[in-house]
Amino acid sequence: MLTYDINHRGNQSIYEYLYQSIRRDILEGKLQQGEKLPSKRSLASHLNVGVITVANAYEQLLTEGYIRSVERKGYFVENLSRYNRKKAAAETDYPPEPPEREFFADFKANRIGLRHFPAATWNRFMREALSLHNDTLWKTIPYNGLYELRLAISDYLLQNRGMKVSPSQIIIGAGTEYLYSRLMQMFGRACTFGIEDPGYKKFAAISASFGNPWKYIPIDESGLMIDLLEDSGADVVHVSPANHFPTGTVMPITRRLELFEWVNRVRKRYIIEDDYDSEFRYSGKFILPMFAEDTQNKVIYMNTFSKSMVPSLRISYMILPPDLLQRYIDTMSFYSCTVSSFEQYALARFISEGHFERHINRMKLYYRGQRSIILNEIAKSPLMKIASVRERNAGTHFLLSVRTRLSEEEVRRAGLAADLSLSMYSDYSYSDVSGGDICTLVINYAGIEQEKIPEVVRRLAGIFPECSGSVL
């Protein structure tokens, strides 16, 4: 007779505990194939539980295929020998995942300072969204996102970016990478993509995963080189004209006009304008997006809230010109929107009530101060004997080129020893830019606390033997 201690079931119901106990005995071989189980009444009497409880446990086991029922004979254990072989393989002991290392300073993490995000305001909007008796928040989200958020984005872009956009042109998605993937799929494998070199390598990886051919297009002091773009045979090109990463280059009007001439020459050509990080400009007016200057509906605009707000807020959007919008509807609208309606509603309120604009203005002031502090610390450190800074008064990063006898790998190792996670210019370049006596670092300072900056610069200088005059 099966015997289980019902008093040891914890918070489980008796039915759930009984079902789990019998199932475990079957999987562990304590109940063999073909073995008959006790009748419902006899087991209920033995365990001092209700017959209905035993009947429910048996019914669940029967539904999942662990036992079979034979009329007028009872319940029997099924043949699960194939499961046992799979189970043995599945029970391999895997080492626990190590926790993500926290560095004293992480120059790879191009993210916002989290302590400055208005969390209380955001949490209030999220609570309101969860408590609203609004049927739209419980229904399936439209493929392109909640209308309220698309309308808020449309109004914001008109007032702050000079872009006249219909909410119907906006597609909401969980991150720029997701939206870029949808574009890859829509354009198809016959489409060749041009990608800036140096630039964001992940877009090339996404293109490769979808089978789309891509070409790295070198840049110069004015941005993407149009003659090499023409020679590449690319149909669609990804650019960040307002603030190229990692160089910080702003594409001048002459180069923009050349790019428009390129895209307008062939009907199937398009520009993907990535306006990431463009909000943070510390002098002069904002750079007008190419989308706002486009007269031939050839520009796809992309932006994200992950950098301007918090990294975990995976909300990005793209704006499609009319012909591509219809193509997207015809081929991609079966995909569900990947952002919850509650987050979208909260973000719509955050934007429409002016909190987003105020937050951006606060962060611009903070980052201007942050940038000034770290540049001043570098200027008075031994680094300036062997280094030069390249920065464009925008974004949250700059380049630091250091003359050193160390190889890049030696610099990385020394950085780790100093509890610094370093980012190299070569990490974003397809062509080989290493070698010689110059090591160029990408200094992402957004996530570094101001009070740490003097010590961060001290540790950074300590990496290079030239700063101390020591000999390798």
Image (cartoon, helix red, strand yellow):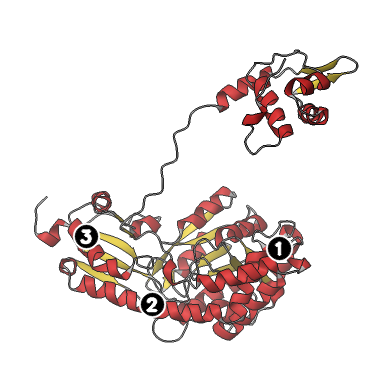
Q: Secondary structure at mark 1?
A: helix
Name the spot of residue 107 as percent of width and height, x first: 34, 61
Which residue was labeled with disc 3?
459
Q: Nearer the viewer, mark 1 or mark 2?
A: 2
Q: CA distance from mark 3 to mark 1?
A: 50 Å
Disc 1 residue crowd, few under 14, some 14–19, many 20+, Cα 10 Å = some
Helix, strand or loop under label 2? helix
Instruction: Look at label 2 and name its amino acid.
Output: Tyr
* Residue 157 percent coordinates (x, y): 59, 80
Residue at x 41% of width, y 46% of height: 99
State the residue in front, 86 or 289.
86
Query: What residue would you read off at disc 1?
Result: 328
Q: Which picture quadrant has residue 106?
A: bottom left
Label 3 vs 1, first from the N-terminus: 1
* Residue sitting at x 62%, y 80%: 352
Q: Nearer the viewer, residue 349 or 44?
A: 44
Can you tell which mark lies on residue 255? none
Residue 366 image label: 2
Q: Quadrant of residue 168?
A: bottom right
